[in-house]
Amino acid sequence: MNVNRRHLMTGTIGAAAVAMVASACASEDGGGDGSGGKKVGIAMPTKTSERWILDGNNLKDSFEAEGYEVTLQYANDVAADQVSQIETMVGQNVDVLVIAAIDNKSLSGVLAQAKGQEITVIAYDRLILDTPDVDYYASFDNTKVGTLQGTYIVEALDLANQAGPFNIELFAGALTDNNTKYFFNGAWEVLEPYVTGGQLVVKSGQTSLEQIATENWDGAVAQERMDNILSNFYNDGSVVDAVLAPYDGISRGIVASLQGGGYTTMPVITGQDAEVESVKYIIEGLQSMTVYKDTRALADTTVDMVVAVLGGEKPDINDNETYDNGNKVVPAYLLEPVSVDVNNYQEIVVDSGYIEADELA
Ligand code: BGC
Protein backbone atom coordinates (compact mmCIF):
# COMPACT_ATOMS: atom_id res chain seq x y z
CA MET A 1 0.00 0.00 0.00
CA ASN A 2 1.11 3.53 -0.71
CA VAL A 3 0.67 4.94 2.76
CA ASN A 4 1.87 8.38 1.80
CA ARG A 5 -0.70 8.86 -0.90
CA ARG A 6 -3.52 7.56 1.27
CA HIS A 7 -2.47 9.85 4.08
CA LEU A 8 -2.25 12.83 1.79
CA MET A 9 -5.52 12.12 0.02
CA THR A 10 -7.66 12.38 3.13
CA GLY A 11 -8.37 16.08 2.73
CA THR A 12 -8.52 18.86 0.21
CA ILE A 13 -5.20 20.29 1.32
CA GLY A 14 -3.74 16.81 1.02
CA ALA A 15 -5.10 16.45 -2.50
CA ALA A 16 -3.59 19.80 -3.48
CA ALA A 17 -0.26 18.73 -1.99
CA VAL A 18 -0.38 15.50 -3.99
CA ALA A 19 -1.11 17.44 -7.17
CA MET A 20 1.88 19.71 -6.52
CA VAL A 21 4.19 16.81 -5.80
CA ALA A 22 2.87 15.00 -8.86
CA SER A 23 3.40 17.91 -11.20
CA ALA A 24 6.89 18.45 -9.78
CA CYS A 25 7.68 14.77 -10.46
CA ALA A 26 6.09 14.92 -13.87
CA SER A 27 8.19 17.85 -14.94
CA GLU A 28 11.37 16.14 -13.74
CA ASP A 29 10.99 12.66 -15.12
CA GLY A 30 7.59 12.26 -16.72
CA GLY A 31 5.79 10.66 -13.79
CA GLY A 32 8.48 9.92 -11.25
CA ASP A 33 7.81 6.18 -11.11
CA GLY A 34 7.84 5.07 -14.68
CA SER A 35 4.11 5.59 -15.17
CA GLY A 36 4.51 8.76 -17.26
CA GLY A 37 2.53 8.51 -20.48
CA LYS A 38 0.48 5.52 -19.28
CA LYS A 39 -3.22 5.67 -19.92
CA VAL A 40 -6.07 4.42 -17.78
CA GLY A 41 -9.71 4.11 -18.77
CA ILE A 42 -12.20 4.26 -15.90
CA ALA A 43 -15.76 3.03 -16.53
CA MET A 44 -18.22 3.91 -13.76
CA PRO A 45 -21.91 2.90 -13.75
CA THR A 46 -23.93 6.02 -13.01
CA LYS A 47 -23.93 9.53 -11.64
CA THR A 48 -27.34 9.05 -10.02
CA SER A 49 -25.67 7.73 -6.89
CA GLU A 50 -23.24 9.86 -4.94
CA ARG A 51 -20.76 7.11 -4.26
CA TRP A 52 -19.86 6.54 -7.92
CA ILE A 53 -19.19 10.25 -8.40
CA LEU A 54 -16.79 10.10 -5.44
CA ASP A 55 -15.22 6.88 -6.74
CA GLY A 56 -14.68 8.39 -10.19
CA ASN A 57 -13.19 11.61 -8.80
CA ASN A 58 -10.96 9.82 -6.29
CA LEU A 59 -9.66 7.42 -8.94
CA LYS A 60 -9.03 10.22 -11.42
CA ASP A 61 -7.16 12.34 -8.87
CA SER A 62 -5.10 9.41 -7.59
CA PHE A 63 -4.15 8.17 -11.06
CA GLU A 64 -3.28 11.67 -12.23
CA ALA A 65 -1.14 12.13 -9.13
CA GLU A 66 0.81 9.07 -10.32
CA GLY A 67 1.29 10.65 -13.75
CA TYR A 68 -1.38 8.68 -15.63
CA GLU A 69 -3.56 10.10 -18.37
CA VAL A 70 -7.17 9.40 -17.37
CA THR A 71 -10.38 8.85 -19.32
CA LEU A 72 -13.40 8.70 -17.00
CA GLN A 73 -16.83 7.68 -18.29
CA TYR A 74 -20.27 7.13 -16.75
CA ALA A 75 -22.97 5.13 -18.54
CA ASN A 76 -26.17 6.13 -16.76
CA ASP A 77 -26.85 2.51 -15.75
CA VAL A 78 -27.21 1.41 -19.39
CA ALA A 79 -25.08 -1.72 -19.83
CA ALA A 80 -24.79 -1.45 -23.63
CA ASP A 81 -23.52 2.13 -23.33
CA GLN A 82 -20.88 0.99 -20.86
CA VAL A 83 -19.73 -1.68 -23.32
CA SER A 84 -19.31 0.95 -26.07
CA GLN A 85 -17.47 3.29 -23.73
CA ILE A 86 -15.03 0.50 -22.89
CA GLU A 87 -14.66 -0.37 -26.60
CA THR A 88 -13.68 3.24 -27.23
CA MET A 89 -11.11 3.09 -24.41
CA VAL A 90 -9.66 -0.09 -25.90
CA GLY A 91 -9.50 1.73 -29.24
CA GLN A 92 -7.57 4.52 -27.50
CA ASN A 93 -4.94 1.95 -26.43
CA VAL A 94 -5.29 2.45 -22.71
CA ASP A 95 -2.85 0.42 -20.61
CA VAL A 96 -5.37 -0.29 -17.87
CA LEU A 97 -9.13 -0.54 -17.53
CA VAL A 98 -10.81 0.02 -14.16
CA ILE A 99 -14.43 -1.06 -14.43
CA ALA A 100 -17.39 -0.95 -12.05
CA ALA A 101 -19.73 -3.04 -14.20
CA ILE A 102 -23.39 -2.24 -14.75
CA ASP A 103 -24.17 -5.76 -15.96
CA ASN A 104 -21.61 -8.23 -14.69
CA LYS A 105 -22.19 -10.59 -17.63
CA SER A 106 -22.12 -8.12 -20.51
CA LEU A 107 -18.40 -7.51 -20.78
CA SER A 108 -16.82 -10.76 -22.00
CA GLY A 109 -16.59 -9.61 -25.63
CA VAL A 110 -14.99 -6.25 -25.00
CA LEU A 111 -12.66 -7.68 -22.37
CA ALA A 112 -11.46 -10.31 -24.85
CA GLN A 113 -10.51 -7.41 -27.14
CA ALA A 114 -8.75 -5.74 -24.20
CA LYS A 115 -6.77 -8.90 -23.45
CA GLY A 116 -5.79 -9.10 -27.11
CA GLN A 117 -4.08 -5.75 -26.54
CA GLU A 118 -2.57 -6.80 -23.20
CA ILE A 119 -4.61 -4.26 -21.29
CA THR A 120 -4.70 -4.90 -17.54
CA VAL A 121 -8.28 -5.18 -16.31
CA ILE A 122 -9.33 -4.39 -12.74
CA ALA A 123 -12.88 -5.15 -11.62
CA TYR A 124 -13.68 -2.21 -9.36
CA ASP A 125 -16.09 -2.83 -6.46
CA ARG A 126 -18.25 -5.20 -8.58
CA LEU A 127 -16.84 -8.47 -9.89
CA ILE A 128 -17.08 -9.12 -13.66
CA LEU A 129 -18.35 -12.63 -14.38
CA ASP A 130 -17.81 -15.38 -16.94
CA THR A 131 -14.55 -14.14 -18.41
CA PRO A 132 -10.91 -15.12 -18.01
CA ASP A 133 -9.97 -11.55 -18.92
CA VAL A 134 -10.21 -9.84 -15.57
CA ASP A 135 -6.92 -9.67 -13.71
CA TYR A 136 -7.73 -8.37 -10.23
CA TYR A 137 -10.65 -7.32 -8.08
CA ALA A 138 -10.62 -4.38 -5.64
CA SER A 139 -13.63 -4.18 -3.36
CA PHE A 140 -14.95 -4.40 0.17
CA ASP A 141 -15.90 -7.49 2.12
CA ASN A 142 -19.32 -7.64 0.50
CA THR A 143 -20.66 -10.47 2.65
CA LYS A 144 -19.76 -8.44 5.72
CA VAL A 145 -21.83 -5.51 4.42
CA GLY A 146 -24.87 -7.78 4.67
CA THR A 147 -23.78 -9.20 8.01
CA LEU A 148 -23.59 -5.67 9.43
CA GLN A 149 -27.07 -4.84 8.12
CA GLY A 150 -28.63 -8.06 9.44
CA THR A 151 -26.90 -7.75 12.80
CA TYR A 152 -28.06 -4.17 13.17
CA ILE A 153 -31.68 -5.26 12.78
CA VAL A 154 -31.28 -8.10 15.28
CA GLU A 155 -29.75 -5.75 17.85
CA ALA A 156 -32.12 -2.83 17.23
CA LEU A 157 -35.15 -5.08 17.75
CA ASP A 158 -33.35 -6.67 20.72
CA LEU A 159 -34.18 -10.15 19.48
CA ALA A 160 -32.03 -11.65 22.23
CA ASN A 161 -34.68 -10.50 24.73
CA GLN A 162 -37.85 -9.66 22.83
CA ALA A 163 -40.04 -12.50 21.60
CA GLY A 164 -41.80 -10.43 18.96
CA PRO A 165 -43.03 -11.43 16.51
CA PHE A 166 -41.76 -8.45 14.51
CA ASN A 167 -42.66 -7.79 10.89
CA ILE A 168 -39.76 -7.40 8.48
CA GLU A 169 -39.63 -6.79 4.73
CA LEU A 170 -36.61 -7.48 2.56
CA PHE A 171 -35.04 -5.54 -0.30
CA ALA A 172 -32.00 -6.40 -2.40
CA GLY A 173 -30.06 -4.64 -5.16
CA ALA A 174 -29.90 -5.22 -8.92
CA LEU A 175 -29.63 -8.81 -10.13
CA THR A 176 -27.09 -7.65 -12.74
CA ASP A 177 -24.68 -6.70 -9.92
CA ASN A 178 -22.60 -9.53 -8.51
CA ASN A 179 -22.51 -7.81 -5.10
CA THR A 180 -26.26 -8.12 -4.67
CA LYS A 181 -26.22 -11.77 -3.65
CA TYR A 182 -23.24 -11.30 -1.34
CA PHE A 183 -24.99 -8.45 0.49
CA PHE A 184 -28.26 -10.37 0.76
CA ASN A 185 -26.68 -13.68 1.71
CA GLY A 186 -24.63 -11.97 4.44
CA ALA A 187 -27.78 -10.42 5.91
CA TRP A 188 -29.98 -13.46 5.42
CA GLU A 189 -27.55 -15.72 7.21
CA VAL A 190 -28.09 -13.55 10.29
CA LEU A 191 -31.85 -13.01 9.85
CA GLU A 192 -33.12 -16.35 8.58
CA PRO A 193 -32.89 -18.24 11.90
CA TYR A 194 -35.21 -15.65 13.46
CA VAL A 195 -37.64 -16.02 10.55
CA THR A 196 -37.55 -19.81 10.89
CA GLY A 197 -38.01 -19.47 14.67
CA GLY A 198 -40.99 -17.12 14.21
CA GLN A 199 -39.51 -14.04 15.93
CA LEU A 200 -39.36 -12.27 12.56
CA VAL A 201 -42.23 -12.50 10.08
CA VAL A 202 -42.02 -11.55 6.40
CA LYS A 203 -45.72 -10.80 5.89
CA SER A 204 -45.35 -10.37 2.12
CA GLY A 205 -43.78 -13.83 1.92
CA GLN A 206 -41.23 -12.31 -0.49
CA THR A 207 -37.89 -13.77 0.50
CA SER A 208 -36.22 -14.99 -2.69
CA LEU A 209 -33.60 -12.82 -4.34
CA GLU A 210 -35.68 -12.62 -7.53
CA GLN A 211 -38.69 -11.34 -5.57
CA ILE A 212 -36.82 -8.75 -3.54
CA ALA A 213 -34.31 -7.45 -6.15
CA THR A 214 -34.45 -3.80 -7.25
CA GLU A 215 -33.80 -3.04 -10.90
CA ASN A 216 -30.84 -0.67 -11.35
CA TRP A 217 -30.73 -0.16 -7.57
CA ASP A 218 -33.41 2.46 -8.22
CA GLY A 219 -35.01 4.06 -5.15
CA ALA A 220 -38.22 4.79 -7.09
CA VAL A 221 -38.56 1.09 -7.97
CA ALA A 222 -38.12 0.19 -4.29
CA GLN A 223 -40.64 2.83 -3.28
CA GLU A 224 -43.22 1.33 -5.62
CA ARG A 225 -42.60 -2.19 -4.33
CA MET A 226 -42.93 -0.97 -0.73
CA ASP A 227 -46.20 0.79 -1.67
CA ASN A 228 -47.51 -2.52 -3.01
CA ILE A 229 -46.37 -4.41 0.07
CA LEU A 230 -48.08 -1.90 2.37
CA SER A 231 -51.37 -1.98 0.52
CA ASN A 232 -51.46 -5.75 0.03
CA PHE A 233 -50.08 -7.08 3.31
CA TYR A 234 -50.37 -4.32 5.91
CA ASN A 235 -53.96 -3.18 5.28
CA ASP A 236 -55.10 -4.89 8.48
CA GLY A 237 -53.59 -2.38 10.92
CA SER A 238 -50.32 -4.29 11.32
CA VAL A 239 -47.05 -2.38 11.05
CA VAL A 240 -43.64 -2.94 9.53
CA ASP A 241 -41.02 -3.14 12.28
CA ALA A 242 -37.89 -3.49 10.16
CA VAL A 243 -36.77 -3.23 6.55
CA LEU A 244 -33.59 -4.76 5.21
CA ALA A 245 -32.48 -2.23 2.57
CA PRO A 246 -29.14 -2.74 0.81
CA TYR A 247 -28.34 0.81 -0.31
CA ASP A 248 -29.14 4.33 0.88
CA GLY A 249 -31.03 5.34 -2.29
CA ILE A 250 -33.32 2.34 -1.78
CA SER A 251 -33.67 3.14 1.93
CA ARG A 252 -34.87 6.65 1.11
CA GLY A 253 -37.39 5.28 -1.41
CA ILE A 254 -38.72 3.02 1.34
CA VAL A 255 -38.94 5.94 3.79
CA ALA A 256 -40.93 7.91 1.19
CA SER A 257 -43.33 5.00 0.79
CA LEU A 258 -43.77 4.59 4.54
CA GLN A 259 -44.36 8.32 4.95
CA GLY A 260 -46.98 8.11 2.20
CA GLY A 261 -48.54 5.23 4.14
CA GLY A 262 -48.87 7.43 7.22
CA TYR A 263 -45.86 6.25 9.26
CA THR A 264 -44.56 8.99 11.55
CA THR A 265 -42.14 6.73 13.41
CA MET A 266 -39.94 4.74 11.10
CA PRO A 267 -39.18 1.04 11.43
CA VAL A 268 -35.56 -0.07 11.69
CA ILE A 269 -34.18 0.62 8.18
CA THR A 270 -30.69 -0.30 7.02
CA GLY A 271 -28.66 1.19 4.17
CA GLN A 272 -25.25 1.37 2.55
CA ASP A 273 -22.77 3.98 1.27
CA ALA A 274 -23.08 6.76 3.86
CA GLU A 275 -24.61 9.12 1.32
CA VAL A 276 -25.00 12.66 2.68
CA GLU A 277 -28.78 12.55 2.33
CA SER A 278 -28.97 9.30 4.28
CA VAL A 279 -26.64 10.46 7.03
CA LYS A 280 -29.06 13.38 7.40
CA TYR A 281 -31.91 10.84 7.56
CA ILE A 282 -30.02 8.98 10.28
CA ILE A 283 -29.62 12.18 12.29
CA GLU A 284 -33.36 12.89 11.84
CA GLY A 285 -34.34 9.33 12.81
CA LEU A 286 -35.74 8.43 9.37
CA GLN A 287 -33.12 5.78 8.57
CA SER A 288 -31.42 3.69 11.25
CA MET A 289 -28.00 2.88 9.85
CA THR A 290 -25.82 2.80 6.80
CA VAL A 291 -22.73 0.82 5.91
CA TYR A 292 -19.79 3.12 5.30
CA LYS A 293 -17.27 2.11 2.69
CA ASP A 294 -14.40 4.55 2.31
CA THR A 295 -14.24 5.08 -1.46
CA ARG A 296 -10.99 7.05 -0.99
CA ALA A 297 -9.33 3.91 0.34
CA LEU A 298 -10.79 1.82 -2.49
CA ALA A 299 -9.42 4.23 -5.08
CA ASP A 300 -6.00 4.14 -3.40
CA THR A 301 -6.03 0.34 -3.26
CA THR A 302 -6.85 0.22 -6.97
CA VAL A 303 -4.14 2.68 -7.93
CA ASP A 304 -1.61 0.75 -5.83
CA MET A 305 -2.61 -2.44 -7.64
CA VAL A 306 -2.20 -0.85 -11.04
CA VAL A 307 1.14 0.77 -10.20
CA ALA A 308 2.43 -2.62 -8.99
CA VAL A 309 1.18 -4.57 -12.01
CA LEU A 310 2.45 -2.10 -14.59
CA GLY A 311 5.74 -1.94 -12.71
CA GLY A 312 6.09 -5.69 -13.19
CA GLU A 313 5.39 -6.49 -9.52
CA LYS A 314 2.71 -8.54 -7.80
CA PRO A 315 0.05 -6.34 -6.21
CA ASP A 316 -1.07 -6.75 -2.59
CA ILE A 317 -3.87 -9.32 -2.45
CA ASN A 318 -5.71 -10.39 0.70
CA ASP A 319 -8.28 -12.80 -0.75
CA ASN A 320 -7.58 -15.61 -3.14
CA GLU A 321 -10.67 -17.73 -2.66
CA THR A 322 -13.98 -15.86 -2.32
CA TYR A 323 -14.53 -14.36 -5.75
CA ASP A 324 -14.97 -17.09 -8.34
CA ASN A 325 -16.28 -15.35 -11.46
CA GLY A 326 -17.45 -18.58 -13.09
CA ASN A 327 -14.22 -18.83 -15.03
CA LYS A 328 -11.56 -18.42 -12.37
CA VAL A 329 -11.02 -17.21 -8.83
CA VAL A 330 -10.10 -13.56 -9.22
CA PRO A 331 -7.37 -12.40 -6.80
CA ALA A 332 -8.86 -9.65 -4.68
CA TYR A 333 -8.04 -6.96 -2.19
CA LEU A 334 -11.02 -6.46 0.11
CA LEU A 335 -11.46 -3.52 2.47
CA GLU A 336 -13.54 -3.48 5.65
CA PRO A 337 -17.02 -1.93 5.70
CA VAL A 338 -18.15 -0.14 8.88
CA SER A 339 -21.63 0.06 10.43
CA VAL A 340 -22.69 3.67 11.03
CA ASP A 341 -25.65 5.00 12.99
CA VAL A 342 -26.57 8.08 14.99
CA ASN A 343 -24.07 7.15 17.70
CA ASN A 344 -20.91 6.98 15.59
CA TYR A 345 -21.53 8.94 12.36
CA GLN A 346 -19.59 11.93 13.71
CA GLU A 347 -16.48 9.87 14.41
CA ILE A 348 -16.63 7.61 11.35
CA VAL A 349 -17.79 9.82 8.50
CA VAL A 350 -17.31 13.39 9.68
CA ASP A 351 -14.07 13.27 11.69
CA SER A 352 -12.50 11.14 8.93
CA GLY A 353 -13.24 13.95 6.45
CA TYR A 354 -15.51 11.76 4.28
CA ILE A 355 -18.42 14.16 4.76
CA GLU A 356 -17.96 17.79 5.74
CA ALA A 357 -19.95 18.81 8.86
CA ASP A 358 -21.63 21.66 6.95
CA GLU A 359 -22.99 19.23 4.33
CA LEU A 360 -25.12 17.77 7.14
CA ALA A 361 -26.45 21.13 8.35
C1 BGC B 1 -22.00 -1.17 -4.44
C2 BGC B 1 -22.74 -0.43 -3.38
C3 BGC B 1 -23.80 0.47 -3.99
C4 BGC B 1 -24.61 -0.27 -5.02
C5 BGC B 1 -25.55 0.66 -5.77
C6 BGC B 1 -22.95 -1.89 -5.32
O1 BGC B 1 -22.27 -2.61 -6.27
O2 BGC B 1 -21.09 -2.07 -3.84
O3 BGC B 1 -21.85 0.35 -2.61
O4 BGC B 1 -24.67 0.89 -2.98
O5 BGC B 1 -23.78 -0.93 -5.95
O6 BGC B 1 -24.87 1.63 -6.46
Image: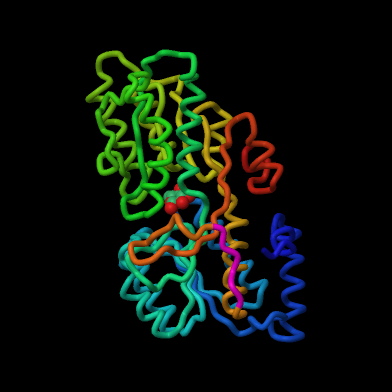
The picture places residue 160, in percent across and down from the top left corner, at: 49, 18
Screen quadrant of the N terminus: bottom right
Identified at 40% across, 30% down, the residue is: 191
Vertical position of residue 153 compared to residue 185: above or below: above
Screen quadrant of the C terminus: top right
Residue segment shown in magenta: 313-318
Q: Residue furthest left?
A: 232
Q: Is residue 317 magenta?
A: yes
Does 5 sit left or right of 328 as displayed?
A: right
The picture places residue 278, in percent across and down from the top left corner, at: 52, 38
Q: How many marks?
A: 0
By secondary structure, the bulk of the magenta-drawn segment is best described as: loop
84 or 333, nearer to the observer: 333
Vertical position of residue 332 compared to residue 181: above or below: below
The picture places residue 254, in percent across and down from the top left corner, at: 38, 33
Q: Is residue 239 magenta?
A: no
Q: Residue 55 lies in what quarter of the image?
A: bottom right
189 or 340, nearer to the observer: 189
Does 338 sit left or right of 324 as displayed?
A: right
Q: Residue furthest front?
A: 321
The picture places residue 50, in percent across and down from the top left corner, at: 51, 51
